[in-house]
Image (tube, grey):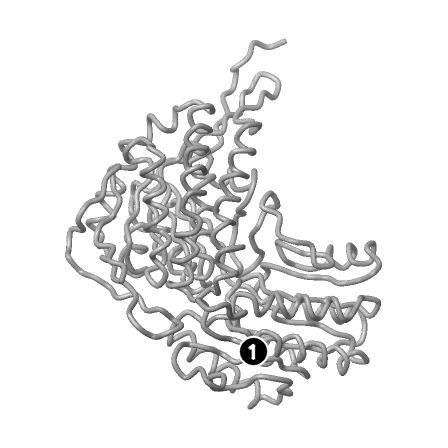
Amino acid sequence: MRNYSHFYIDGRWVDPVEAETLDVVDPATERVTGRISIGSAADVDRAVAAASAAGEAWGASSRQDRLAALERILAQFEKRVGDLATAITEEMGAPNWLAERMQAPMGAGHFTTAIATLRDFEFTEDRDTTRIVMEPIGVCGLITPWNWPIHQICAKVAPALATGCTVVLKPSEIAPFSGQIFAEVIQAADLPAGVFNLVQGEGPVVGAAMAAHPDIAMISITGSTRAGIEVARTAAATVKRVHQELGGKSPNIILEDADLQQAVSHSVGLVMQNSGQSCRAPTRMLVPNRLMGEASRIARETAESWPPGDPKAGSRMGPVISAPQWDKVQRLIKSGIEQGATLVTGGPGKPEGLEQGYFVRPTVFRDVSNDMEIAREEIFGPVLCMIGYEDEDEAISIGNDTDYGLGGFVHSRDLDRARRVAARIKAGYVSLNDAGLDLNAPFGGYKQSGNGREFGSHAFMEYLEVKSVLGYSAAR
């Protein structure tokens, strides 16, 4: 049983202002696996005051000082990768293999990327007699989700610290353990007091207090579109910068010349690998009508090769995060059946033999119409929608017919053709022929998938203000 009763503020572990706690439930067992203190607006005030006090010195620190700090964080992080993976399995149900090979190591990847970016990043540029200067925006409030907890923490904290900003972090209260361990990493790395601060708590309380705080210059949130809208609305009164990485309903266009076996099987795996709880997952598979029979056979066989089970005992797929999430997924699976989609495999209810835990049957629908609820809503569970099309133009039209614009996928043996289709997809992130994740490639979305970008040098820009100094150089 984990018991995290303190927050990390101003370089030390402190008691919360109010002694309220929240139980953390293991989604694989439905049992309480730990307890955290949850914060209040007063705790946010303390954290922001510490970050503000540290801001001038940290913002004026040299590139070399910040590089050294990031390298110390990375070294300490690598010592704790195993602890982080164990915590992630407990808090959000990621299977051991996923937590150990992807979830935890991706955090280190963001610090490695930030270090490499910082070494060469140009904070000044001269244009004629004007100098353009990039300066740290100030205190940043970071709100991170439960589905890739340490990955998202590091994706925000690394560029914020690299650019000279100070940080107040609120991890998801549903999956808070990895955030606590990350604060221990920061403490071991010996950063100046107040540069990094951690306050646990609930979004409507701590998140809202951060969004409204007049001394927080920028808020970055990864979460649902609903949550992003609320943060933006609350932040509007202080005219702070708002960066949002929100929901997705990514189209996956499989063209008729694609390697069908490879394209379908790999894509189904991307949907299933985090129990469907990835915002960029290719959950709408667009297939030529004449290939739908063969594609749905491959999809069924692949989905059935992802049996859910105990994430601590080598299962390929774990549970979804919580009872409310399980209920949402079940409602949408039933909606798909009721609205006339053909159930290929899976369906409502828990998998046989898994009555305890929030497990979902890997589910595939075919004959989905793009106006069905399962094609419009972000399900965030292991559910694939297969949609037929007649020609390339129709596929692109269906793919873009969504409120979201986070990701897109294209499969074709003709790379030039895949590139042409990618150019017409209205999304911030398009993967061709199963290209893997690139932590230097800007990541973010169009439309209701948010604004701004994470990863690499584009992430740095989110945390910088731009100042023009006219007459900086003598006229030539």
Q: Residue at x 45, y 43 (%)?
A: 78
Q: Which residue is the extreme one toward the front?
A: 313
Q: Quadrant of residue 341?
A: bottom right
Quarter holding the N terminus is bottom left
Q: Is residue 284 shown above or below 70?
A: below
Q: Residue at x 56, y 34 (%)?
A: 117
Circle count: 1
For the residue pair 322 and 237, the one nearer the viewer reads as 322
Q: Disc 1 designates what residue?
A: 362
Quarter holding the C terminus is top right
Describe residue 440's horizontal placement relative to residue 34 as left or right. right
Describe residue 223's horizontal placement relative to residue 418 as left or right. left
Q: Quadrant of residue 50?
A: top left
**Residue 205 in the image, given as x and y percentages of width and height:** 27, 58
**Residue 365 in the image, given as x and y percentages of width and height:** 63, 82
For the residue pair 152 and 318, the one nearer the viewer reads as 318
For the residue pair 184 and 468, the one nearer the viewer reads as 184
**Residue 165 in the image, given as x and y percentages of width and height:** 39, 35
Q: Residue at x 62, y 68 (%)?
A: 269
SS label for mark 1: loop
Residue count near mark 1 (Cα–Cα under 10 Å), binned few <14, some 14–19, many ≥20: many
For the residue pair 222 and 93, the one nearer the viewer reads as 93
Q: Amino acid at mark 1?
A: Pro
Q: Quadrant of residue 137?
A: top left
Q: Is residue 223 shown above or below 292?
A: above
**Residue 274 in the image, given as x and y percentages of width and height:** 52, 65
